[in-house]
Image (cartoon, coloured by chain):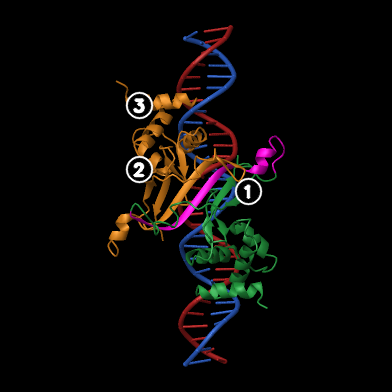
Chain colours: A green, B orange, C red, D blue
Amino acid sequence: MITNMEKIKTLLEEKGIKPTFQRLKILEYLSNNLNNHPTVEMVYEKLLNDIPTLSLTTVYNTLNNFLEKRLVFGVTITGTEVRYDFNTDYHHHFLCKKCGQIIDIDLKCAYAEGEKGIISGHRIDEIHGYFKGICKDCSKNVGKKSRGRSSS
Amino acid sequence: MITNMEKIKTLLEEKGIKPTFQRLKILEYLSNNLNNHPTVEMVYEKLLNDIPTLSLTTVYNTLNNFLEKRLVFGVTITGTEVRYDFNTDYHHHFLCKKCGQIIDIDLKCAYAEGEKGIISGHRIDEIHGYFKGICKDCSKNVGKKSRGRSSS
DNA sequence: TCCATATTTGTAATCATTTCAAGCTTGTAA
DNA sequence: TTACAAGCTTGAAATGATTACAAATATGGA
């Protein structure tokens, strides 16, 4: 039986990244938190339990490394911080301006893959589709207390 | 004959924003720089010529005010700063990762207007389509010196 | 075992943005 | 006019995310 950790290790090796303990744990955390779209701080705080010597700089270095190797996707929908997404399948994101939640949106823009990654002559490497508004739950609970941080 | 400044003034008044000198000049600058997608700093530096007492905070305050009133659109494609776009018609943006240029992309995503602004039950107020890659010019000039700042 | 190289760490710096309090304008009512 | 409140503008200081840097540590051969 192949453990999840072994899969994570293989993923790193396939990208030519040496599977150190910190890197394994960081990628494992992201793979277990597909719906959170975690921040650097969230990764750091959580892993501090497993790795008390962990440095915030290591988390930054590691995530930047993963980004370069396209092992994870950086979501900058909030405008204030990078959120990390282990799911690199093509999809979009929705930000609720009331509760701050980021929700995956499974749309395929017509222009995404059809035109061999060229638009008006420009070579496209990344597509980010960001939708912002009020989520289903917050729309329902108008006037009630929101369940997350507010954006203003 | 209606001057450009009068048009700018009317735009502010229509949104219930008192047309002070600073606000007029900031909005005028944005209207004259549709292709730049200027940063706060660019607005500030340029207007310092006309308004030597201008404060950076005023530029921030004013642009945030314009954003709230939907007089301008905030583009966060670079991930490090807000770029301001006077053109609030629905369109997307392309960032060249080599020269840093931001180019307007006139696409209409099928989901943009059709479904009355609702996706999966979430109310959509803003749509940001960010494409990143290498622009036409930089693709041509491979190996040649790029004409702007580099992104790494 | 020893050394070169890569990795991790903590601190300090940077950069965009916000906070805050004080000073300035402006419109209006006495 | 004069005086005052409300709204604007200003500059300095604070904040928060991220990067730079250099020292300490781990790793994998010769």
Q: Which mark is residue A101?
A: 1
Pinpoint residue B9: horizontal percent, then vertical percent.
40, 25
Q: Which residues are magenta?
A: A121-146
Which residue is under mark 3? B5
Binning the other alpha carbons within 10 Å of mark 2 as few (below 14), some (14 to 19) or many (20 upward) gives some
- Kindly state the secondary structure of the residue where label 1 is placed: loop
Which residue is under mark 2? B35
Pinpoint residue A129: horizontal percent, then vertical percent.
50, 50
Q: Amino acid at mark 1?
A: Gln
Q: Nearer the viewer, mark 2 or mark 3?
A: 2
A126 relative to B24, above or below:
below
Chain at numbered mark 2: B
Marks 2, 3 in one chain: yes
The quarter holding residue B7 reads top left
Left or right: A39, with B106 as reference point: right
Determine contact: label 1, label 3, CB under 8 Å. Answer: no
- Residue at the (42%, 55%) spot, across then down: B132
Binning the other alpha carbons within 10 Å of mark 3 as few (below 14), some (14 to 19) or many (20 upward) gives few
| Between B105 and B38, the one nearer to me in the picture | B105
- Can residue A105 be seen in this snapshot? yes
- Residue at the (57%, 66%) spot, across then down: A58
Magenta segment: does it hold A8?
no
C1 relative to A10, above or below:
below
Cα separation, mark 2 vs mark 1, equals: 32 Å
Q: Earlier in the sequence, mark 2 or mark 3?
A: 3
Chain at numbered mark 1: A
Q: Amino acid at mark 2?
A: Asn
| Between A31 and B66, the one nearer to me in the picture | A31
Pinpoint residue C13: horizontal percent, then vertical percent.
48, 57
Magenta segment: does it hold A138?
yes
Cα separation, mark 1 vs mark 3, equals: 41 Å
Cα separation, mark 2 vs mark 3, equals: 19 Å
